[in-house]
């Protein structure tokens, strides 16, 4: 791995703990103004001190994030579909030159294994890896799950491993029972979990704890943080699990205290 690639990964995955809390706010690229992200800047601003990286599109970063901010950007560079159409029909929407201009610390796309456009999305990942290797920019592959897929360890292991074999540098997938098998299938490639739909805070914290216990190096969470009744409390609680080795109960206490302030 070249120096630039290692340096960028070290900005995202903190060398002190080997872990990371990514804040995902890229939902608008296919969901439009998702609950909590209509004014993305206002939502994200208080959360930035507790996030290790921000997953976002180029349009959102230019609109709502000040360039002086000190946070690694994981740039969502795929899209081309919406919630109204076939979700797997993605293309690359942002070229590597623009990712470099934005000073992205990583680039990311979704891969829909089993989806109608499975091959095209693997091809998208492959292109990003070629570009990323050329310029020293790591690629985070998101294992997107189509409506008809079952999010079990077998499926998530299959799709994560395909992303690893295609050359992804970080895998983002979903937590499930038997998650250690998914992590094992990824070998040395670090794995983070997405949060998915909004859950009660205690359940989202249990999920984060389970993922870390099973070998994930962190989370790339969106709705379970920014749609919480205490987004700052929630990101602090998640951080306490990921970086601080806290239990679910200890983390929940952090969330409760912040909520009741
Ligand atoms: C979906 O493909 C987007 O990449 C989101 O970033 C991802 O789903 C993580 O956000 P959430 O935790 O809300 O699921």
Image (cartoon, grey):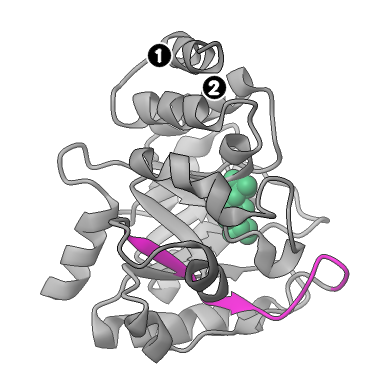
Q: Are marks 1 and 2 in contact (CB under 8 Å)?
A: no
* x, y percent for residue 125: 50, 78
Based on the picture, tell me whether residue 79 belongs to the magenta stretch.
Answer: yes
Instruction: Give the residue displayed 54% in from the left and 69% down from the top.
Output: 63
* x, y percent for residue 135: 26, 85
Instruction: Give the residue displayed 54% in from the left and 22% down from the top.
Output: 206
Mark seen at residue 206: 2
Using the image, determine if residue 100 lies above or below residue 176: below
Q: Quadrant of residue 111?
A: bottom right
Find disc 1 in the rendering and name its residue. 247
Instruction: Give the residue displayed 88% in from the left and 69% down from the top.
Output: 84
Instruction: Give the residue displayed 48% in from the left and 17% down from the top.
Output: 258
Q: Quadrant of residue 85?
A: bottom right
Based on the picture, tell me whether residue 55 belongs to the magenta stretch.
Answer: no
Using the image, determine if residue 223 lies above or below residue 128: above
User: Is residue 51 in view from this perspective?
Assistant: yes
Q: Residue furthest left?
A: 3
Judged left or right of residue 261, residue 168 is left
């Amino acid at each position: 791995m070249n120096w630039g690639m290692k340096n960028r990964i070290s900005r995202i995955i903190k060398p002190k703990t080997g872990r990371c809390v990514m804040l995902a706010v890229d939902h608008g690229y296919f969901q439009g103004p998702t609950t909590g992200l209509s004014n993305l800047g206002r939502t994200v601003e208080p959360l930035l001190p507790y996030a290790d990286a921000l997953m976002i599109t180029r349009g959102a970063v230019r609109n709502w994030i000040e360039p002086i901010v000190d946070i690694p950007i994981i740039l969502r560079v795929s899209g081309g579909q919406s919630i109204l159409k076939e979700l797997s029909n993605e293309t690359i929407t942002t070229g590597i030159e623009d990712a470099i201009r934005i000073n992205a610390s990583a680039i990311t796309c979704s891969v829909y294994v089993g989806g109608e456009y499975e091959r095209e999305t693997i091809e998208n990942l492959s292109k990003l890896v070629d570009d990323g290797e050329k310029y020293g920019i790591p690629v985070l592959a998101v294992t997107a799950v189509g409506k008809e897929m079952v999010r079990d360890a077998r499926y998530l292991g299959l799709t994560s491993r395909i992303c690893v074999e295609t050359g992804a540098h970080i895998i983002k997938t979903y937590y499930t029972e038997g998650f250690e098998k998914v992590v094992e299938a990824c070998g040395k490639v670090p794995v983070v979990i997405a949060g998915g739909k909004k859950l009660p805070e205690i359940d989202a914290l249990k999920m984060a704890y389970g993922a870390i216990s099973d070998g994930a190096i962190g989370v790339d969470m969106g709705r379970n943080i920014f749609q919480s009744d205490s987004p700052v409390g929630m990101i602090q609680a998640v951080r306490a699990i990921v970086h601080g080795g806290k239990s679910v109960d200890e983390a929940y206490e952090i969330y409760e205290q912040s909520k009741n302030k």
